[in-house]
Image (cartoon, rainbow, N blue to C red):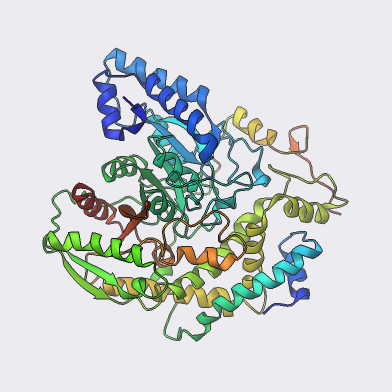
Amino acid sequence: MISKNEVKHIAKLARLELNGKELQKMEKELSLILDYVEKLKKVDVSKVDLKKGLYESKGITREDKEIPISIEDRLRIIDLAPEKKDNYLKTKKIL
Amino acid sequence: MDLTSFTIKQAHQGLVNKEFSALELAKAYLNKIEKKDKEISAFLTVCDKSALLQAQKVDEKIARGDSIHVLAGIPIAVKDVIVVKDVKATAGSKILENYIAPYNATCIKKLKEKGAVIIGKTNMDEFAMGSSTERSAFFPTKNPHDLTRVPGGSSGGSAAAVAANMSGYALGSDTCGSIRQPASFCGVVGFKPTYGAVSRYGLIAMASSLDHIGPFTKTVQDCRIVFDAIKGKDDLDSTSAELPENDFSDFKIKGMKIGIPKEYFAEGIDEGVEKIVKNAIKKYEDLGAKIQEVSLPYGTDHALATYYIIMSCEVSANLARYDGIKYGHFTKKAKDLFDFYLKTRGEGFGDEVKRRIMLGTYALSSGYYEAYYLRAQKIRTLIKQDFERVFKEVDVLMTPVAPTPAFKLGEKMTDPLSMYLADIYMAAVSLAGLPGISVPCGKVDNLPVGLQIIGKYFEDNKIIKIAEFLETRA
C-alpha cells in the first residue's frame, strides 16, 4: 500500500506533474503492483552475496580522453535543443 | 511474383542472378506498405526516398559486377527506439515526437555498411514499456493474422511488418520479451541474443541491464544472417562482448538434452498453447533428443515481480534525461526551472511510463532501497544460479513464449498487472541475460504460437541451430 501523500512526494522526486485524477489512479495502481511484488519478501536471500556471481565484474574502463566530433555534428546536436543562444543551450535560471 | 514474400536468402539470390533489381525490391515493399499499413499501422515513419536511393546504390554495385553482402538491398524495418542518423526516432513517445537522431546506432552502422535498405521505423509501446503496442503515444498496431488483436509488444510494429511482408526483416529490442512475445503473436522468428552480444549503442535506454537488440525474420536461417551482421564487441558499449567462435554447424539433435521447466507449464497457460508447444518439443524427441523435467522455482511469478522492481528502478534513472532542455518536448507554461521539469515531463510522458518512473523512484527512495531494489538484485542472483544449475544437466530449455495467443485490442488496457502477466515466461531469461529465440510452432484458431528455446551464455548459435531443425520439420 502507498498513501496519497507518498505518491505526491514521489512524483516530486521524479519531477512529474500529476493532476488530481492521475494522483488517485497512481495511488491505486502502484498499490496493486506493490501487492504483487510482496511475494519477494518471502524469498530467503540470506545466502546471496552480491559481491559474487552476477556482480563479480572486474569493471571495464577506458582512457578518459575526449572523443573528437565534427563541427557539423556539434551544431546538429545543439540544434536539437528547444531553446538556445549563441550555440549554447538556454534554460530557465536556477538561482 | 510477389517479391515481398521472399526470405533474405531468396531475395539475395534473386538480386545476384539479376531476376529483379534492388530498386524493384524496395518499390515492391513500399507498395506493400502503402496498401497494407493503412489497416495494420506498423510504421511510424516510412523512409521511401532514402530507401530508393540506397537500393539504386546496390544496383550500381551489382551492375559493376562487385560482390554484395547477403543483406545488401534487402529492405529492413527498424523499431523506433533504435536511432538512424537523420531519421526521426520517437521511441513511441510524445516527448521525442520531433526528435531527429544525429547519429547511427552501432547495429545500424553495421547494416548500412553492408548495404541494407532501411525502409522505415516501426511502432512500439512508449519507450518499449508494454506488451501489446497499444501504449504507443501515436496509435495501436494490429496483428496481421487478426486485425481485432494486438501484435504483442513492445516491438509490435517490427513483428507485424515482417509478418505482413512489409519488410524483409526487422530489428526490435527486448527488455522482458519485447522481441520474443510479438514474434510469437505474429508468427515470425524473434531472437533475443545473450546480453552484450549485440551493442546497445544507439538504443534509446529503458533498463540498461536488461535491454537487448535482436532481429525479427521470416526464417531461422535469416535470423542467423542478421545476427551475424549486427553482433560483436563495440567500444561504445562497455557491456558488449565478442561471441566465441563456434557456429555449432555440426550440432546433432540426437542425444541432446532438453530441459522442460515445470513451472512454465503450470496454471494460467492456455490449453491450446500448451498442446502445440509440447508437440513441438515432441518433434525433437522424435529426432533423438532426451527430455528432462527441471525446476526453476523463481522462474515465472517471482521473476516477473523481480523484473518489475529492477526495471522500474533503471527506468527512473534512465528517463531522468528527458528534461526538455537538450532535445524533445518542452513545456511553454513553466514559471521556473523546477516547474519546467514537472510540466515538460508531465505533458510528455504517457501513463505507463509515468507509472514505472514512479515505481522505480519509490523503490529507490530512502527507507525502501533495501527492501525493494537490493532484495530484487539478490533474487536476480538466485534466478541466475537456478539457470546455471539446470544447465549443468541439459543443453537447452524449451518453454512456451506466452501463456496465450494474441489477445484482443483493449483487453488488457485497464489493468496494468494483467498486461505485465503476458510476459510471465520472458522475465527470468531477461534477468539472467541468456539467449532466447521464439520460433513459430503452430496455431490455435488461426493465431500463431511460438516455442521459446533458451540457451547457455553465448551459445546463441546453438539455439539458432536447434530452432532450424524445427523449421525444416514443420
Up/down of B64 relative to B256, above or below: above
| Front-lying residue, B99 or B410 | B410
Q: Position of residue B465 (x, y in %)?
A: 22, 51
Up/down of B173 relative to B68, above or below: below
Up/down of B263 relative to B89, above or below: below
Residue, x 51% and y 28% (percent of image)? B34
Q: Position of residue B248 (x, y in %)?
A: 19, 51
Up/down of B53 relative to B344, above or below: above
Residue with the most extreme top position:
B64
Q: On the image, which quarter does residue B88 sit in?
A: top right
- Res. A93 visible in picture: yes
Residue, x 50% and y 72% (percent of image)? B306
- Res. A52 visible in picture: no
| Front-lying residue, B152 or B308 | B152
Residue, x 53% and y 45% (percent of image)? B141
Horizontal relation, residue B433 to residue B49: left or right: left
Residue with the most extreme front position:
B445
Horizontal relation, residue B24 to residue B286: left or right: right
Horizontal relation, residue B211 to residue B219: left or right: right
* The N terminus of chain B, quarter of image: top left
Q: Position of residue B157 (x, y in %)?
A: 49, 44
| Front-lying residue, B386 or A3 | A3
Horizontal relation, residue B455 to residue B347: left or right: left
Q: Position of residue B375 (x, y in %)?
A: 52, 78
Residue, x 59% and y 52% (percent of image)? B135
